[in-house]
Image: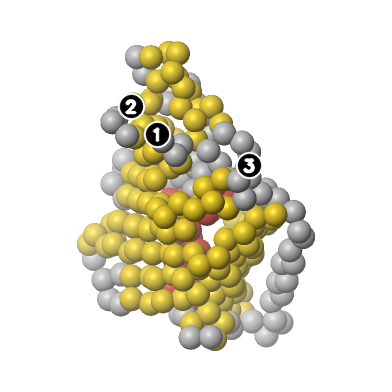
Amino acid sequence: MNRRTLVFLFISLFAFSACSKKTVGALAGDPKATLNIESIDFEYFHGKARMVLRDANKEREVKANIRVRKDSVIWMTFSVIGVQGGKALINKDSITIVSTIDKEYYVFDYVELSKRFNFPINYDVIQASLLGNPLLKRSETDVIEQLSSMYLLKQKTGTVDVVNFVNSAASKIEKIELKESDSNNTLNISYSNFQPVGNKLFPYNGTISLFYKTPSGLLNTTIIFEYNKAEVGDRELRFPFNIPKKYDRR
């Protein structure tokens, strides 16, 4: 896995607090109705997934091992054909990415990433996206619309419009659309194949599609993920992470 692929993978995952059902506001035109979005409960989460990264030039497949300690740390390793290609440690302060193949590492803080994407990125947003939970907290300016089998929760933060598509029967988010008004860059996240994990439903399949402008034109990059294992519990997990001294910081 090359450096560019590894960096894009981790940055994209922010937009690809556990508790019981959350009440998220009154429906427009029906102040008595409420929309509930179910969030998965966990103290520790462990998952294994197959990921496919696709752009205009090539397609790559990696296997990911993911561990999460609630509201604290996210740990990931990536491998290609049994060979580790990289790893990452995401905590409340920053994201550290190590490229094993290139013998390099780089550190991102959330202020830098938020400016790059014009979206408030922090640990809570990344954790929510991995679990299929809402990316943003509720606001008085949110708008909720009811369709035949779906609710639309429309939110706005800065120049980014966010639309959440919530299955009315399962109370789970099936799709999130983000659009930055100044650049028209868009990020779409879809979730499917919901299966019980603990006592809640968890999306075993998902797709992240990023459309963004560059000097050479409009580009599209897609990440498809498919979990083959997802567990939650209170058994303590390990998060081993070290950076060899010979690795260069970029």
Residue 178 drawn above or below residue 227: above
Left or right of 78 in this view: 246: right
Q: CA distance from mark 3 to mark 2?
A: 26 Å
Q: Residue at x 62, y 59 (%)?
A: 231
Nearest to the eye among marks 3 and 2: give it: 2
Q: Which mark is residue 146?
A: 2
Residue under circle 3? Answer: 17
Q: Secondary structure at mark 2?
A: strand
Residue lying at the far left of the rendered structure: 217
Dividing the picture into quadrants, the one containing residue 48 is: bottom right
Q: Secondary structure at mark 1?
A: loop
Residue 181 location, x and y as percent?
31, 40
Residue 45 location, x and y as percent?
64, 57
Dividing the picture into quadrants, the one containing residue 243 is: bottom right
Mark 2 crowdedness (10 Å alpha carbons): few <14, some 14-19, many ≥20: some
Residue 116 location, x and y as percent?
45, 53
Q: What kind of residue is marked 1?
A: Ser
Whether residue 144 can be seen here: yes
Q: Are marks 2 and 1 in contact (CB under 8 Å)?
A: yes
Q: CA distance from mark 2 to mark 1?
A: 9 Å
Q: What kind of residue is marked 2?
A: Gln
Q: Quick one: label 3 or label 1, which is nearer the N terminus?
A: 3
Q: Residue at x 60, y 46 (%)?
A: 199
Q: What kind of residue is marked 3?
A: Ser
Q: Quick one: label 2 or label 1, which is nearer the N terminus?
A: 2
Residue lying at the far right of the rendered structure: 236
Residue 226 location, x and y as percent?
44, 65
Name the residue nearer the viewer: 91 or 150: 150
Q: Which mark is residue 168?
A: 1
Residue 99 drawn above or below residue 207: below
